[in-house]
Amino acid sequence: MLDHYPHLIHLGDASQFIERFASIIDRIKLFEDFEYQEVRRLALRMPCYRALPGTVLIREGDDGDFALLVLNGRVNVIKRDATGHHKHIGDAAPGDTLGEMSMIDGRPRIASCIVEEEAEFAVLDRDELTRIIAEDQRLGIKVLVELVQHLSRKLRVASTKLAELLAV
Amino acid sequence: MLDHYPHLIHLGDASQFIERFASIIDRIKLFEDFEYQEVRRLALRMPCYRALPGTVLIREGDDGDFALLVLNGRVNVIKRDATGHHKHIGDAAPGDTLGEMSMIDGRPRIASCIVEEEAEFAVLDRDELTRIIAEDQRLGIKVLVELVQHLSRKLRVASTKLAELLAV
C-alpha cells in the first residue's frame, strides 16, 4: 500500500491515537453512535504514518486503493491546470479525509496531496475495508455509514459551489 | 414522506419494476454482488410513484428525508441564482438518483427537481434505510456499499468539474 513511499515514517496502528481518533469519528445520526470499543477495533486496522513537508502522499493520475484520515498537520491539495502548472485547490487539516474516491472505485486520483506541515495520518485501504465488512459486520456497517456521511458532506460542499457557479 | 404531494400517483412498491431495478443496481466491486433475492427485498421497501411533467419532486431549501431512484422519464435539476431566477443545472435519467444528501444529513435541499418527461421513480427514506440496517444487516451492508459508490461517483464528477474550474 504505502510501503513504496520511502519518506514515510510508519507509526504502527491508530490505537495510539485513540482519543484523537474517537474525537474525529462523527456522531452517526443514521444509526447508533460508534462505541469506544468499535473505534478501537477500527483503529487497530488502520496503520499510521508521519510524513515531512513536501512529501507527496497522493499523486494526480495514479491508481490508488487507500484513503487517508489526517490526524495532525496540514496537507495541500494540488491539481495540474490545462497548461500543466500545479494549482492549489484546497487543503486538509486534522479530521479531514483524502482519497476516498479512488479507494472506492479504483479509478485514478483526480488531484495530488502534498504535506505542507509535518503530518500524521491513518490509512484505510480497500482490502482492509472489505475484510472489516466480511469479518465484523457490525463495525462494517458503522464504517460504511461514516463513509456515506463523509462523502455526502463533501458532495454537498462541492455541489453547492458548483451549482452556484453554474447558476450564475 | 411523499404523501403530501397530491400530484403523485402511487404505484405500490418497486417489486413490479424488479427487472429494471435489478439492471440499475450496480455491480459492486467493493463487496459481492447483489443477489436477485436481495434486490427483491430492497424493492419491497421502496414505494414507487408516477408524476406528470411539471411536478416538483424536491424543492430547493426544503427539509427532506428521502432519495429518489429514477426508473423512467426525465427530471430537471434547477437552482435559483443570486437574483432569484431559476437556472437549469442538470437532469436525471433512468438509473440516476436524486436527493441522497438530504436523506443522509437531513439538511435542506440544495436544488429543485422538476419532472420534465412523465417519470416513475422509487423512493428510499431515512427511516426505512435505518430499518433495513437494523433488521437485515446483510442487505443493509449492500445498500450502504451501493450508496457509497453512488456518492463517490457523483463526488468524482463534481470534484473534477470544480477542480478544473479552480485550476484555470
Image: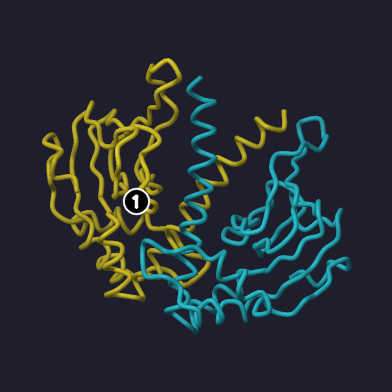
Chain colours: A cyan, B yellow
Q: Which residue: 70% across, 46% down?
A: A91
Left or right placement of residue B146 versus residue B43 in this view: right
Nearest to the observer: residue B101 or residue A51: A51
Q: Which residue: 36% across, 76% down?
A: B138
- The image quadrant where one finds the C terminus of chain B is top right
Give how far across and how far down residue B99 sits, in percent.
Answer: 36, 44
Nearest to the observer: residue A27 or residue B28: A27
Q: Which residue is mark 1?
A: B103
Q: Which residue: 53% across, 48% down?
A: A154
User: Which kind of residue does numbered mark 1 sit on?
Assistant: Met
Left or right placement of residue B128 versus residue A33 in this view: left
Question: Which quarter of the picture shows residue B2?
Answer: top left
Q: Secondary structure at mark 1?
A: helix
Give how far across and how far down residue A83 sits, in percent.
Answer: 81, 30
* Above or below for A137 versus A67: below
Question: Which quarter of the picture shows residue B40?
Answer: bottom left
